[in-house]
Amino acid sequence: MTVTDNESGTYEGFTAEERAAMKDHAQERKKAARRASREEKAAEAERDVLAKIAEMEDSDRIMAERVHAVIRATAPALEPRLWYGMPAYALDGKVVCHFQNAGKFKTRYATLGFSDVANLDEGTMWPVAFALTEVTPEVEERITALVKQAVS
């Protein structure tokens, strides 16, 4: 999502949303580096994720709350944390999946994305991001299956 709105189509820099995400990431790294016990850091990270979810617009917030609940119930070993200002879930410090609300980059739908750490390999090509417009019971089942596979 870089800005290339000039006539030559050349790169003009990062969008405001991208700069904000990078700033969020820098703050997250500073916060994680502070000395505290593992339990204190985990509790603070959970609070940060829930606070970020609470800031979202209604439809995104409702979906993020459901995604958070499904992931926490399905894979308790995944640790919630912020990643570029988005709710994410990590295993051994590496992000496995994240929720990107539609408002984050002004897109028409939210996404549930998986990193290369996720064990979703299927042949020579497989999806790693899923568009979300609503979290129904069927969607919750699909998220559950994907998260279980991702951490297996």
Image (tube, rainbow, N blue to C red):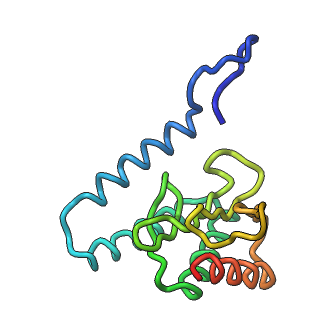
| Farthest-out residue, left | 35
Instruction: Please say if 97 is above or below 104.
Output: below
Is 135 positioned to the left or the right of 152 in the image?
right
Is 76 positioned to the left or the right of 39 in the image?
right
Q: As rendered, which of 103 and 93 lies closer to the eye?
A: 93
Measuring from the top left, give residue 79's x and y in whole percent: 44, 75
Q: Residue at the location (70% across, 64% down)?
A: 59
Q: Residue at the location (59% across, 83% down)?
A: 152
Measuring from the top left, give residue 52's x and y in whole percent: 49, 62
| Farthest-out residue, right | 138
Measuring from the top left, give residue 42's x and y in whole percent: 34, 75
Q: As rendered, which of 7 and 120 lies closer to the eye?
A: 120
Q: As rendered, which of 66 and 81 lies closer to the eye?
A: 81
Name the image quarter holding the N terminus: top right
Residue 54 in view (yes/no): no
Q: Residue at the location (65% across, 51% down)?
A: 103
User: Which image quadrant for residue 7?
Assistant: top right
Is 19 positioned to the left or the right of 9 in the image?
left
Residue 21 in view (yes/no): yes
| Farthest-out residue, top | 7
Is 100 positioned to the left or the right of 132 in the image?
left
User: Which image quadrant for residue 122?
Assistant: bottom right
Measuring from the top left, give residue 11's x and y in whole percent: 63, 21
Q: Residue at the location (49% across, 52% down)?
A: 84
Please tell me how many numbered marks the rendered image carries: 0
